[in-house]
Image (spheres, rainbow, N blue to C red):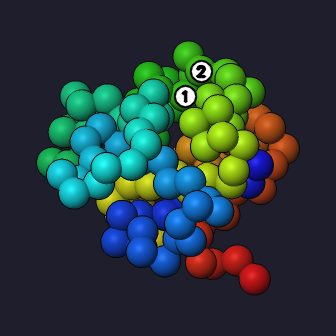
Amino acid sequence: MRIYTSYFGKLNTIPTGAITPIAICGKAPEWYKGLEYKILAPKYKFFQEWKQNQDNDFYIEHFDNEVLAPLSAAAVYEDLEKLSNGNDCVLLCYEKTENFCHRHLVAKWLETNLNIRVVEWGTFK
């Protein structure tokens, strides 16, 4: 299974059936009726503080310690594989590709801990 990342605004570019979209945010858009994996969502408290101060270092520290550190990357991979029925999946959030987003932190964490490549949907060749 390959894992990609993307954002809801690009959902219509992801081929239906071949790749399974999975939202990893605290609250998906009302119109989104797909799968969600909230285990990888940021915690409300530090997310709200980040929205006010835009301190990415603060966010990364809290995301790493409060969300990723308690998890096993292998177990997360297994969960995603089960959710997607073994298909490739794309982890979705709100921010555009070039903007700071927790999905990029998740991608790096998976790459580091599982020795896999996780790329942003549409940026690969």
Q: Secondary structure at mark 1?
A: helix
Q: Say which mark, if any, is on residue 6.
A: none
Residue density around tag 2, few if under 14, some if 14–19, many if 20 or more, within 10 Å: some
Residue 7 x, y percent position in the rendering: 41, 64
Residue 42 x, y percent position in the rendering: 36, 35
Q: Nearer the viewer, residue 20 or 110?
A: 20
Residue 112 vs 5, above or below: the answer is: above
The residue that appears at 41% across and 39% down in the rendered structure is 36
Residue 40 x, y percent position in the rendering: 47, 34
Q: Amino acid at mark 1?
A: Leu
Q: Say which mark, if any, is on residue 68.
A: 1
The residue under label 2 is 71
CB contact under 8 Å: marks 1 and 2: yes
Q: Is residue 62 visible?
A: yes
Q: Amino acid at mark 2?
A: Leu
The residue that appears at 33% across and 59% down in the rendered structure is 94
Q: Secondary structure at mark 2?
A: loop
Which picture quadrant has residue 27? top left
Q: CA distance from mark 1 to mark 2?
A: 5 Å
Which picture quadrant has residue 104? bottom right
- Judged left or right of residue 14, residue 56 is left
Name the image quarter holding the C terminus. Answer: bottom right
Which picture quadrant has residue 4? bottom right
- Judged left or right of residue 9, residue 88 is right
The residue that appears at 76% across and 35% down in the rendered structure is 113
The residue that appears at 61% across and 53% down in the rendered structure is 89
